[in-house]
Amino acid sequence: MNRQKRKQKDFIIPFCEGEAEKLLFSFLKITYSNKTMGFARPINLCGVRDFDEFKRKYLKNCKAYSLKPKKDFKNVNFLFILDNDLNDSKKIEKFILKEGHLLQLCDPNTEGLILSLIGKKQICSTDNVNFRKKCKDNFESHFNCEAHKLKDAQLRKIFSSLKIVQTNLIVLHELFTK
């Protein structure tokens, strides 16, 4: 019996900083993915405060997948979706890229990104901790809910075209349209 060798499909395992990033990823995947790449259900890292906490969660979650031997999993990638306003954002970014993983930073953070997409750009005029709180407060004032509780209709209005994703979430755009 002749068996045809089937090409292994690329597969992405997304790790999201929190519920808002998980919601955003899931919505965009359903809305814009062309289905040529497989995606696991997003994993919630339940927040990240600094590099040490990120590394602990990284080691715990990535080791749980035990992707050995590497040759059998060459088309599997980890994708991290994180806010870009942590004090250690640059250090975390460098670590993720050095490990060969994919990274989508939400700039300045998920709430600030969404607010800027609707014309309410957030300006950082304070330290990162207070700026994060300011963005979350402004988001709740405008949408009357936290970011992870946005409804599909609201998200469809905000991300009304693939061009918005292409401009603001480059890594996700590339994965969904590859």
Image: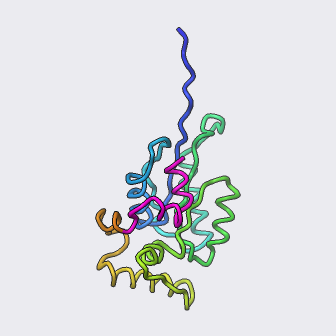
Colour setup of the view? rainbow
Residue 62: percent from the left, percent from the top? 57, 52
**Residue sitting at the far bottom:** 125
Q: Is residue 98 left or right of residue 50?
A: right
Above or below — where is 80 with respect to 51?
Answer: above
Residue 86: percent from the left, percent from the top? 57, 76
Residue visible at 35% across and 75% down in the picture: 146
Q: Which segment did they paint magenta? A: 158-178
Q: Is residue 41 magenta?
A: no
Q: Is residue 7 left or right of residue 120?
A: right
The image quarter containing residue 99 is bottom right
Residue 91: percent from the left, percent from the top? 67, 70
Residue 42: percent from the left, percent from the top? 44, 54
Q: Is residue 175 magenta?
A: yes
Q: Nearer the viewer, residue 54 or 84?
A: 84
Q: Nearer the viewer, residue 111 or 165?
A: 165
Above or below — where is 3 with respect to 50?
Answer: above
Q: Nearer the viewer, residue 12 or 154?
A: 154
The image quarter containing residue 85 is bottom right
Residue visible at 59% across and 42% down in the picture: 67
Q: Give the total number of marks visible in the rendering.
A: 0
Q: Is residue 132 left or right of residue 67?
A: left
Magenta: main secondary structure equals helix
Q: Is residue 80 left or right of residue 41?
A: right
Residue visible at 45% across and 60% down in the picture: 44
Residue visible at 34% across and 67% down in the picture: 157
Above or below — where is 125 with respect to 61?
Answer: below
